[in-house]
Image (cartoon, rainbow, N blue to C red):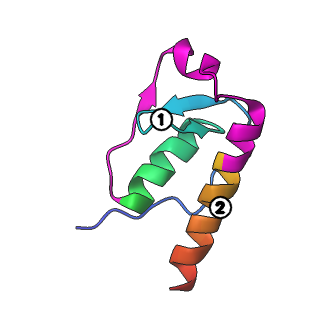
């Protein structure tokens, strides 16, 4: 039996930190990315990740754009 990854998440901006050190738009995006990469990524319930020197809304936006590009690449392969 193989799991099927969610194609897309509902748009909701409730930013969370993933155990991979990346910012995600919401919980769904964490689990979706985990599934797509076949890698365990979970939500880190620590506010510290939001206040890193490199952490910012721009970083979150880049992270979301990166994942969208990865998904496009994986669906076109």
- Quadrant of the image containing the N terminus: bottom left
Coordinates of residue 3 in the picture (x, y in percent): 33, 62
Q: Is residue 64 above or below residue 27?
A: below
Q: Quadrant of residue 69?
A: bottom right
Helix, strand or loop for disc 2: helix
How crowded pointer 1 is (Cα within 10 Å; few <14, some 14-19, many 20+) is rated as few
Residue stretch rendered in magenta on the structure? 38-62
Residue at 42% x, 39% y: name it: 20
Identify the residue shown where x is 41% and y is 33%: 19
Mark 1 falls on what kind of element? loop
Give the residue displayed 62% in from the left and 36% down from the top.
26
Question: Is 64 placed left or right of 70 in the picture?
Answer: right
Residue 10 appears in the picture as rendered = no
Discs 1/2, front = 1
Give the residue furthest to the top. 47
Residue identifier under label 2: 68
- Any magenta on residue 48? yes
Q: Which residue position is annotated with label 1? A: 21
Report if residue 61 is visible in the image: yes
Where is residue 49? Give x, y as percent.
54, 22
Image location (x, y in percent) of residue 4 = 40, 64
Of the residues under marks 1 and 2, which one precedes in the sequence? 1
Q: In the displayed structure, would residue 70 be above or below residue 46?
A: below
Residue sitting at the far front: 53
Q: CA distance from mark 1 to mark 2?
A: 17 Å
């Amino acid at each position: 039996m193989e799991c099927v990854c969610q194609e897309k998440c509902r748009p909701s901006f409730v930013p969370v930190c993933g155990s991979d050190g990346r910012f995600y738009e919401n919980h769904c995006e964490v689990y979706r990315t985990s599934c797509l990469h076949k890698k365990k990524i979970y939500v880190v319930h620590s506010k510290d990740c939001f206040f890193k020197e490199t952490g910012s809304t721009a970083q979150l936006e880049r992270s979301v754009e990166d994942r969208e590009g990865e998904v496009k690449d994986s669906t076109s392969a």
